Amino acid sequence: MGAAPEGENPLQLPKKLQVVVEVPKNVRPGVTKLAVDVDEESELHILVPVEAAVGDRLRISKEEGGPWTCVILKNQPLYDMTNRQLSSPGGDTGKLQLLVPATIKPGETKLQVSISDSEQVQLSVPENASPGDLVELVRSAETWTAKFTRDRYSVASDPKNNLAVMADLAKTSSQAGLDAEAAAENLIAVAKEAGCFVSPKIKRGCVPPLNIPGLVAVEAIEEGEELIRVPSKFHITPPAVERAAPVLAEAAKASSLPEQRRLEALHAFFVARLLADSQERAVSSEKASNSNAFNRWTATEDQKKVWEAYADTLLTEDFSYHPFRLAACSPEEMRGHLSPSQEAEYYIDMASDLMSLHDTMLRSSEVAGMPERLEAEMFLRARMSAQTRVFQTCVDTTLVPVADLLNHSPTLTPGVLWSWDAKAEAMIVTAVRAHNAGEELFTTYGARSNMLLYRTYGFTLHPINEPSFTYIIRPHLVRPIMKIFLDDEDARPLILLETSHIDDSLCQVLNKVGKKGGNATEFLRLLCARSRWGYEQNENIRPALEALKRAREVDPGSHAWWEHIDDKHKDLVQQDAVRVIMSEYLCLTAHMEAADAADGRDDVPYLSSCEAWRKSVAKALGLCRTCGGFSISTANSAKSS
């Protein structure tokens, strides 16, 4: 990455008759008029510009014989370049840094910086500037020079070898020649024989509205009826793997991986071994394989049968729909579809991350004397299976055969729910409403935004059913803001923005800003404005953004962009990439509105779907200002720290 100055201009305060007034609270920009005394005998009534905000200053000036003009002076803090701490105007500094404010119009907005009580500098924001750009003011004799600097970053070259393995996940399933529906039906039969309960009223099927394989009612089902019960002895968890494959567990412990990653690798390696044996059985004329993992691993006969049948179902999945594989097949095409979102980079990075995990585990198994080599393709398939199928029981990472055949509800009202019965030590699936014969049974994978649904499972919901919005701030994309407000060592972690709750990563970074004496509200506003800028300049999603604007003109609290999109672009509503992008854009918008709410602004519209969350964020920002920080309670409401 590198930075390049956009230009230099000597700046001097123009000599004009002028008055500067601050925009008070309880005004309505574009509506309220302020009475301003311009001399001992004259009073000027000025309309507060629409672009102004509470705390901004208005510079009202005129040349002799000319008209009065009004310029917004955004409320912009000064920063000392040396220690990057907020400095008070009036200090004897010859070099200052500030950030382009969140609410600007490039080529139009003018900033006024107070150097001291008697010295001010005015500068115009260039047309190619964006919120959060760094502005450096340098004194030279009696003149100040301004440099606007924009960060440029490069995308690392794609790891072609790693992507090729991810892209080729279809090879094994086609070679094995397994029938997906037959494998699922066999799993259900084997599970029932081993002691699991699967209601005779359900079967594997494919019906509208999803038209993808799931579980379907073959008879009427009553509310409260138990449909599936899978005892914990058939669950595949890291502790279960440690008991079944102690040698493998010791090999994982010998690796250099941190605890959570070690358990992840151990779990994936075990499932990958099951998949490899499933492939050997499928391509061999014999049902048993001499290289079967259970020749060395410990399991009951029932566990062995269920896990083998389960592996057969997993092997039929080629993940052709999943963004990890789509990105591996065509990185540039995925980047193009998701631009300006950075999610494509995450998908591509995951291929390298999983390959690295495989290599580490493979080296550890060789040191431990384990004879078999496990292909990377099987390891990736195992990790993808875990990512798209795990439950959280008494163990975070739990694969539950049969129960994971249920699809996620396309609406906010699932028909069945799963639960962990600690006393019975079993996963139980129960109907929460009545179902008719022929109706698909839907559960929920959690109240996730489209961005999180897509990166985890490879699908999105219609935006009308999206429960919340998500955006992940990557520090290198907001580097000037992070460097100004935080020390370098505090500016590295990712920051998760969610409109369902205040994530701990956001809590931590806001507290750091508050404890350093910075303005956490302005920090959050700048992060979001800079991140959102690229979306507003992108032509691909302009029809969706214009539809959102029309929706908010009808109802200021609405985010129903899909209802107002023009006929020419109706297809955008069905595209996963657009749904992801709009989820991110709405998340950034909601956080900027939360910053406005923290400033006490009642003259701007707020997204009504985020009201309770917005109040919590506004309270948290207020505590940063008054107490220097806050903490998150279990109910996710902000408390002073």
Image (cartoon, rainbow, N blue to C red):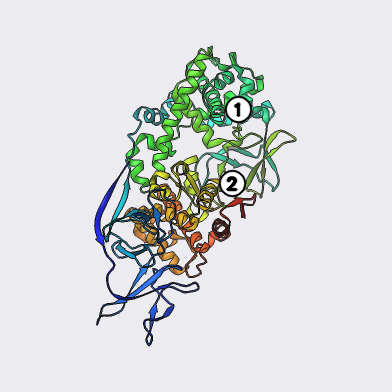
Image position of 623 with respect to 180: above or below: below
Relative side of 151 to 627, left or right: left
At label 1, the amino acid type is Pro
Between 372 and 403, the residue placed more toward the observer is 372
Q: Is 11 on the left-hand or right-hand side of 334?
A: left
The single residue placed furthest to the right in the displayed view is 423
Q: Quadrant of residue 619?
A: bottom right
Q: Nearer the viewer, residue 514 or 504?
A: 514
State whether residue 460 appears in this view: no
Residue 238: mark: 1
Tag 1–tag 2 contact (CB < 8 Å): no
Name of the residue lying farthest toward the bottom: 41
Q: Nearer the viewer, mark 1 or mark 2?
A: 1
Where is residue 267? Give x, y as percent.
56, 27
- Please state the horizontal and vertical placement of residue 127, each as a whole percent of the image: 28, 59
Q: Which mark, by number, is residue 439?
A: 2
Residue 607 in the image: above or below residue 280: below
Check the picture and name the quadrant holding the N terminus.
Answer: top left
Label 1, label 2: how far apart the Cα atoms are? 35 Å
- The dot on residue 487 is none
Between 2 and 408, which is closer to the camera in this rendering?
Answer: 2
Q: Residue at x 59, y 42 (%)?
A: 216
What is the secondary structure assignment of the residue under circle 1?
helix
- Sort mark 1 into few (<14), some (14-19) or many (20+) by Cα contacts within 10 Å: many
> Would you place residue 41 above or below residue 565 in this image?
below
Image point 69% across, 47% down: which residue?
222
Q: Is residue 190 above or below residue 518?
A: above
Q: Secondary structure at mark 2?
A: loop
Rendering coords of residue 331 (x, y %): 35, 37
Residue neighbourhood size for the residue with mark 2, other residues' Cα within 10 Å, grouped as few (<14), some (14–19), many (≥20): many
- What percent of the width, then of the height, locates residue 275? 51, 24
Q: Is residue 616 in sight in this rendering?
A: yes
